[in-house]
Amino acid sequence: MENWWKNSVVYQIYPRSFRDSDGDGIGDLKGITQKLDYLKLLGVDAIWMSPVFKSPNDDNGYDISDYRDIMDEFGTMEDMECLIAEAGKRGIRIIVDIVANHTSDEHKWFEEAKKSRENPYRDYYIFRDNVDGTVPNGLTSLFSGSAWEYQEDTDSYYLHVFSKKQPDLNYANPKVRQEIIDILNFWIDKGVGGFRLDVIENIGKEPDREIIINGPKLHDYVHEMYEQAFSRGDLMTVGECWGADEEKARLYTDPKRGELSMVFQFEHVTLDEVPGEGKWCLKKMELADLKRVFTKWQNAFHGDGWNTLFWNNHDLPRIVSRYGNDGAYRVESAKMLATLLHGMQGTPYIYQGEEIGMTNIQLPSIDDYEDIETLNMYKEKIGQGADSAELMRSIYAKSRDNARTPMQWSSKEHAGFTTGKPWFAINPNYATINVEDALEDEYSIFYYYKKLIALRKQKEIFVEGDYHLLLAEHPDVFAYVRTYNDQALLVICNFYDREPQISVQTELAGILGRQPGAGLPSCEILLSNYEDCGNPLDVLKLRPYEAILCELT
Ligand code: TEU
């Protein structure tokens, strides 16, 4: 099928924490290959793996020192080829994560570039001379502090939007663009199914004007990648774009323009932060905001773009702990959140462990954390006199490490993740939240996800249907209907543990173009998170976190 990714579901793996096959405590490629049958059972079509390339791991692989080789801890190129082939046999494509905005400072290009101002690689990066002993301008790193690092040998500063071990590449240099295109083609030749492009919105930066994202040449550069690499096959490409609004998302994803298949925008997962204050500044998510944001994005494209659908990734806290309830209603709320997302238009992404309802973690001390963003933020804020307990509250809610604890495969030692000493803390709740138990329970979150994935493949309306919000003003319930030809799909989600009474009949009749009283269609329940669910076309009292997905015929 052309554009196979439109009715596909993607599973994201954070290789370091997925499955360790050799007992060194770090997940690896062979571990992923061993679990392909598990992913096949779940029903996913593609696996996006966070970077597996050679890296000193300052930022867990997002600092790449060789794009054509595999990180030692993860295995060999042979293991990678074997994974691509074995996945292929199961109809699963491998999506690799290319960090095109920056390299590691241990990449041979940077090692050359820093040697002298005349070095042929100098212009691969963004150096500025030391003029008056201060940084060139006020740009700050997303991982705290100035974005400029002093480099003594050549008395200059280089730009790093992320850690100082992640120097930014200079896309104004055509040689850099060609190098990256060659890398993309190298992996296309290896048989990958596509790419996730890390912080792609940063590559058109103009640092002297303090423009970091959405620079004037951005779309030219992405189009060039499309022309010279992505268009070589029916590949899936997804760009990470924190700063994309609908118009920008359309520029990337309008098929007529030849750039990317889709982008990740993050508006729905920034609703629990104080606007403008950044992720660590906590606020309660308001359901009205969530409805507004999803509805806007669901209606953003009319064949001139495509959405991603996701709650989690390796940078985000676990959704069940975040917008759900990871206590008494963990199972119900995890299923409810899955229903809301998978009923929408776009390509759904599932992050490892989401399918068993894995939760956030609270580690006793800052010293137990691993993530560079978390550690740098803590150090910086403590230096400015912040209160440690308050910082820990933010870290418990938002640290990227919430997503990075090892996958919980069983209730055995180290959650069945490794036979050695795990590289990072395992969530103690693995005794009850694990894959082995999930597979034995027909009502588990796992089997619920499996059904949602299967439904998307069976029914065209999931891919094609229009979206209409219902009960817009309701404080507890997020409901919508999808329509396609004479078909309709109704989704009702109760977001809290309250038990509201709702009626969607009149509104539904209006959307479906029926006269009030002319009789509504009949309703077939496709999926719900309580065993015996009432008729959604009657006046209905919802139970805590109840979710209903039904087809109206
Ligand atoms: O993330 C981009 C990014 O902007 C993150 O720093 C994000 O703002 C933050 O994680 C939210 O908490 C990508 C990768 O997904 C991330 O893992 C890398 O650390 C980063 O790029 C640098 O490559």
Image: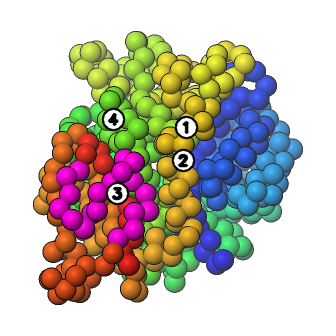
Residue type (three-letter) at the residue carrying disc 4 = Tyr
Q: Which residue is mark 3?
A: 548
Q: Quadrant of the C terminus?
A: bottom left
Q: Which comes sooner in the sequence, label 1 or label 4?
A: 4
Residue type (three-letter) at the residue carrying disc 1 = Asp
Q: Which comes sooner in the sequence, label 4 or label 2?
A: 4
Between the residue at mark 1 and the residue at mark 3, the CA separation in whole angstroms equals 20 Å
Residue 510 image-quadrant placement: bottom left
Q: Which residue is mark 4?
A: 329
Residue 174 placed where, x, y %? 63, 64
Asked if residue 538 is among those painted magenta in the image, a careful observer would answer yes
Between the residue at mark 4 and the residue at mark 3, the CA separation in whole angstroms equals 16 Å
Q: Which residue is mark 1?
A: 441
Residue 483 placed where, x, y %? 36, 78
Asked if residue 348 is among those painted magenta in the image, a careful observer would answer no
Q: Are marks 4 and 3 in contact (CB under 8 Å)?
A: no
156 lies above or below 254:
above
Residue 307 placed where, x, y %? 44, 66
Q: Which residue is mark 2?
A: 447
Between the residue at mark 1 and the residue at mark 4, the CA separation in whole angstroms equals 17 Å
Left/right of residue 212 with respect to residue 426 in the rendered view: left
* Secondary element type, mark 1: loop
Residue type (three-letter) at the residue carrying disc 3 = Ile
Q: Is mark 2 within 8 Å of ligand 1?
A: no
